[in-house]
Image (tube, helix red, strand yellow):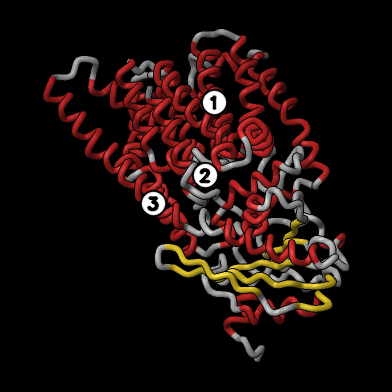
Amino acid sequence: MLLTFFLLLHILKSLFLGVHVDEANWWMQSRHLSAGYYFHPPFTAFLVRVGTFVFGDGAVGLRMAHLLLAAASLALAYLLCREMGLDGRWSFFTVLLLACLPFTNYWITMVVVDTPMIFFALLFAILAWRAIAAGESGYWYLAGISVGFMLLSKLQSVLFILGILFFLVTSPGFRSHLKRKEPYLAMVLALLILTPTIAWYAVHHFEPIIYQLTSRPGFLHSGPGDYLVKVAKHAGWEALSLSPFVYLFSIIGLVCGGYLGFRRRKPELLFLFWLALPGTVFFTLTGGPPRWGFSSHLFSLVLAMASASLLMGTTPSRRSRQLQAAAYWGLFLIPCLAITSLTLYLSASSTVHSGWKEVAGAVDALASAEEGGGGTAPVVASPYYFISSEIAYHQRGHPLEYTIAFLVYENEVMCDNSSYSPWVPLDRLEGRDFLFVDERDNPDGFQTPASFWEAKLAPYFREVEEPVVLRLSSHGREREIYIFRCSGFKGPDAEMDSRGEARRYVENPCGD
């Protein structure tokens, strides 16, 4: 009943919540299937391709496969609770809490790589536990298959493999599994599933992996003060994504569960502890976005509930039950639902969800006018992939080409490597006309004037017309979108992409 309500609620939500910029990008990637992509492995793109083929390209159809996986993940979380020794009542309330989290209701119910990774991580945990605790060797092979698809979803899931290894090393009663062939054959199965993606990375000189390792961790390019700020922001945003008391419960549960597991020799607690610890620590120390560590917090919340169940005993008094219920509702569920409601309300009017249909309509009108005049369809370009992806998604019936050009902003998250699909390489576009689109409020946190683009674009085209300015109002905020009609692209050069150039122009517009 809970899973049905959860699924129907988010199908209804999808009717009103616009397509997120990351969702539009994955839709775009799914039109150009590959064994790997610049940011992540390919499973999400293939899942979107299958999901939209079955359910259609609308917002509901786009998300449906991920919604089904999110609901299935809650079912697997219930099974994991039961495997870890929680009774039906504790297991239900654990899953109810997970279903009410702001992160669950906003992030993993969209088209993101975390959704399939969480599903396969939970499946892997259940199968690995059955292989370890029950000694049923066949489960190792099923666990290996789950690992393969988990890694195809998101490479950070290697941390769960490390967690199982740490558990076996630190558990004398189960250490003998390291001497058996089954765990290693399971990893061979996983690598076989991952082989096409590994080959793709090799062909691309492992550039995407190198980028992830050298650019994404917050501490690599920060001084001590900035690094501490990043860590504090990560913890603060995680607390909001989970709700503050649930976040504290997760951290306390991790510490308490680990202590009880070692002290009382409870292997199920140690199992959850080692699944949760690597990701929680790693992403806190690297100071990344809060979503990166959520899958680890999921395991630590199950651990926290298992620890609480153990400490409170199986036959609490009536007074104790009343206090438990008051704490559960007052500290956990009600704050979760309040933050979730606020998040969805704010998201509905956010620029990552709204306004893109209007932008695509304006681009479509300009492209149709050029084609009507006897010319070929122009190429749609922008300085970061969010804009091109959203326009492409909302122009599904109009076959245009898309590219990324003039990467002048400093924000790494907003810029993709334009040599990867689905963007047409710039050296193939010489002589073509462009519709170049940018937004005044740029990802670096200030405003880009139209005059910057007039000066920047002019040397690269035969002619650049004055921009069509599209003004959008939402909840009292005005957005400005610039659309430049550019004729006769002269080709790229080394000066085309100059990170920080827009900021330097704004700070010194006269070039002194």
From the image, tell me which residue sits under label 3: 345
Location of residue 74 with respect to 287 vertically, above or below: above
Q: Amino acid at mark 2?
A: Trp
**Residue depicted at 65% across the width and 44% down the height:** 27
**N-term-proximal mark, 2 vs 3:** 2
Q: Amino acid at mark 1?
A: Ile
Location of residue 319 with respect to 276 vertically, above or below: above
Q: Quadrant of residue 121?
A: top right
Between marks 2 and 3, how big is the CA–CA gap? 23 Å
Q: Nearer the viewer, mark 1 or mark 2?
A: 2
Numbered marks: total:
3
Q: Answer yes or no: do the residues labelled 2 and 3 have beta carbons within 8 Å? A: no
Q: Nearer the viewer, residue 331 or 47?
A: 47
Q: Is residue 74 left or right of residue 197?
A: left
From the image, tell me which residue sits under label 1: 164
Measured as percent of width and height from the top left, residue 490 is found at 86, 72
The C terminus sits in image quarter: bottom right
Q: Nearer the viewer, residue 453 or 488?
A: 488
**N-term-proximal mark, 1 vs 2:** 1
**Residue depicted at 11% across the width and 24% down the height:** 319
CA neighbours of label 2 inside 10 A, class few (<14), some (14 to 19), many (20+): some
From the image, tell me which residue sits under label 2: 292
